[in-house]
Amino acid sequence: MESNYFNFELIHTCKKTGARAGLLHTPHGDIETPIFMPVGTHSSVKMLTNDQIYSTGAQIILANSYHLYLRPGHKLIKDFGGIHGWMNWNKPVLTDSGGFQVFSLAKNRKITEEGVEFRDTKDGTKHFISPEKSMEIQQSIGADIIMAFDECSPYPCDYKTALNAMERTHRWLERCVAAKYNDKQALFPIVQGAFFEDLRKKSAEFVKQFDSVGYAIGGLSVGEPHDIMNKFTELTASLLPNNKPRYLMGVGTTEDLLDGILRGIDMFDCVLPTRNARHGSFFTYGGRKIIKNREFERDNLPLEPLCDCYTCQNHSRAYIRHLFRQNEGTALTLLSIHNIKFLINLVKQARNAILNDSFDEFYNKLHNNLK
């Protein structure tokens, strides 16, 4: 499955912690790792234009193949030259397979060996996605990195449920590999196995045989306690090839980013920065804060004095608080720019610390304050 269009260089591993700094080459540009990927669910990062996304330093964004399949349709996106032409974005894009969204529908879906039948929650129409269909959708969308169709186990679940989901994920991976034809896209298998060490080991051994460009860790950050997530992140990362990028799916709190990097993770994504912005919260090096709080009514400081984003370079907390309280959309844009830039800066600073073999000091200085 290795492609001539992709290559990963592991540039440095921190001597004290094992945290990694790398460089992933893709057809639409290089990605310095560790990396945080903003989420553009419907082919747009909420509240932001492309210029505003570029201004945050984003090197890659994630789009959701499930939502794009439903609206506007993957065939329409293909007719516009794929996701890059459709949204006029010239950097790398990653699409998820739609598996997590389908499996989160609970009573509105039915899982079989062939795939998943589900109803659109907006109009009630019936749809069916198989591994082959997922590959068709993602190859039509044309993202640089695409994900295998998998079954994610809930937390908690019993051993048999986790085993069955993992084994089906493996069979579906084989079908995804057989249905993929575009060498300019990298297919990442996903390690499953829920919260059972032996299943995680079996899953990692299975996916490694495909010699993929990179590997994803699924089934974490699904409601489990933080210490359990860290345990299985560390275990699963240690089982994957050292010379390939490791992607921890759906993780994006400041604490989780630092904990994941510490455990050898290279790639992260999450809707949290823009979701938090819509609820009026913002990241600082002293932890997350709420802009509508009275303490910011006359505060002339930027959201985070050490941040170099557009928002922090141009506007005060008091001004943004006023906009938010008046339901001005500009407030959500300004908060979103800051939150995304903050996380991208955080992983960039982590990368520099790794290169200097000082990630342990960086981690210890920031971790407790950022919660």
Image (cartoon, rainbow, N blue to C red):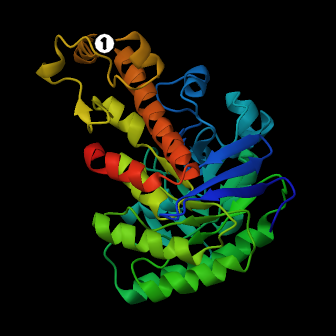
Q: Which residue is mark 1?
A: 316
Around disc 1, counting alpha carbons within 10 Å, would you say few (fewer than 14), some (14 to 19), or many (20 or more)? many
Residue 337: % across, % down: 45, 26
Residue 352, position in %: x, y? 55, 44
Q: Can you say which quadrant of the picture contains the N terminus?
A: bottom right
Q: Nearer the viewer, residue 355 or 51?
A: 355
Please name the residue shown 54% across and 38% down the image.
40
Q: Is residue 328 above or below residue 40?
A: above
Locate residue 118 relative to residue 28 in the image: left or right: left
Q: Nearer the viewer, residue 69 or 42?
A: 42
**Pick the front one: 88 or 261:** 261
Task: State whether residue 113 appears in this view.
Answer: no
Residue 104 sits in which quadrant?
A: bottom left
> Looking at the image, can residue 72 be seen?
yes
Is residue 209 rendered to the left or right of residue 106?
right
Q: Is residue 291 above or below residue 17?
A: above
The quadrant where residue 63 appears? top right
What count of labels does the image hold? 1
Q: Position of residue 342 (x, y in %)?
A: 43, 34
- At mark 1, the secondary structure is loop
- Residue sitting at 44 percent across and 85 percent down? 197
Q: Position of residue 167 (x, y in %)?
A: 56, 84
In the rendered structure, the answer to whether residue 298 lies left or right of residue 348 reads left
- Which quarter of the picture shows residue 297? top left
Q: In percent of the image, x 43 and y 14: which residue is there?
A: 313
Q: Residue furthest right?
A: 4
Image point 54% across, 63% down: which residue? 15
In the rendered structure, which amino acid carries the disc numbered 1?
Answer: Ser
Q: Residue furthest left?
A: 294
**Does residue 175 appear left or right of residue 235 in this picture?**
right
